[in-house]
Amino acid sequence: STISLTATAKTGYTFIGWDKGYTNIVESTTVTAQYVRNEVPVTMYTVTFVDGDTREVIATQKVQEGKAATLPEAPLHENRVFIEWAGEYSNVKENTTVTAIYADDMNNDGIEDATQPHYDITYYDYNDAVIEVIEDVLVDMPTPTIADPERQYYTFNGWDPTVAQTVTDNAEYTATYVP
């Protein structure tokens, strides 16, 4: 006798037939549907990582659509600190460029200078007259110095207090002299 079989649809698969014939059945028989997995096209995109200071390519990666790129190590630069990667790299949907962003780090402490304290250094003469004000000096930088002042009939003898090696706060220094 002839039996009519219907294959159940399976998402992601295509029915290709039965594992055996099912006509002239004379005893209990199991007939199994055969399927093949559908090929899913994979779309790949290129993610290019660029150094924001030098504009040089750091790395290039092929990334499957919707997947994340692996962040490379950001290059080190003297007096600069790496801040962030700018651009889409976690859910890639097109060819894209991701840029390493840097900021000034003149005191080389690994912290962006713009977020750190800045101080003023004031140099006075013996009579409290301002010789020079140096404004906006970044913390932990060498204290800026000025030329030794001159005073008729006297020899410059240093600053009071002694000029600190590095800037840690606003500072005032007064010239001292000896006859």
Image (tube, rainbow, N blue to C red):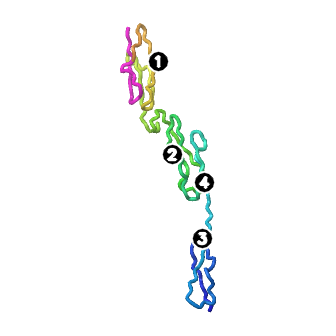
Q: Circle 4 sits in a helix, a strand or a loop, which is it? A: strand
Task: Tell me whether the residue at label 2 lies in contact with that at label 3, contact meaning CB atoms closer than 8 angstroms.
Answer: no
Q: Which residues are magenta?
A: 159-179
Q: Nearer the viewer, mark 4 or mark 3?
A: 3
Task: Tell me whether the residue at label 1 lies in contact with that at label 2, contact meaning CB atoms closer than 8 angstroms.
Answer: no
> Callout 3: few (<14), some (14-19), or many (20+) C-alpha neighbours within 10 Å?
few
Tell me the kind of residue under disc 3: Arg
Tell me the kind of residue under disc 4: Lys
Q: CA distance from mark 2 to mark 3?
A: 42 Å
Q: Which mark is residue 63?
A: none
Question: In this figure, which residue is indicated by the disc labeled 4?
Answer: 62
Tell me the kind of residue under disc 1: Ala
User: Which of 17 and 134 lies nearest the eye of the viewer?
Assistant: 17
Q: Residue furthest bottom?
A: 1
Question: In this figure, which residue is indicated by the disc labeled 2?
Answer: 84
- Residue 115: image x %, image y %? 44, 39
Q: Is residue 79 magenta?
A: no
Q: Which mark is residue 37?
A: 3
Residue at position x 39%, y 30% in the image: 168
User: Which of 109 and 23 lies nearest the eye of the viewer?
Assistant: 23
Q: Is residue 48 above or below residue 15?
A: above
Q: Which mark is residue 147?
A: 1
> Callout 4: few (<14), some (14-19), or many (20+) C-alpha neighbours within 10 Å?
few
Q: CA distance from mark 4 to mark 3?
A: 25 Å
Which tag, 4 or 3, sits closer to the chain's start? 3
- For the N terminus, the quadrant is bottom right
| In the displayed structure image, the side of residue 63 where residue 109 appears, left or right | left
Q: Circle 1 sits in a helix, a strand or a loop, which is it? A: loop
> Callout 1: few (<14), some (14-19), or many (20+) C-alpha neighbours within 10 Å?
few
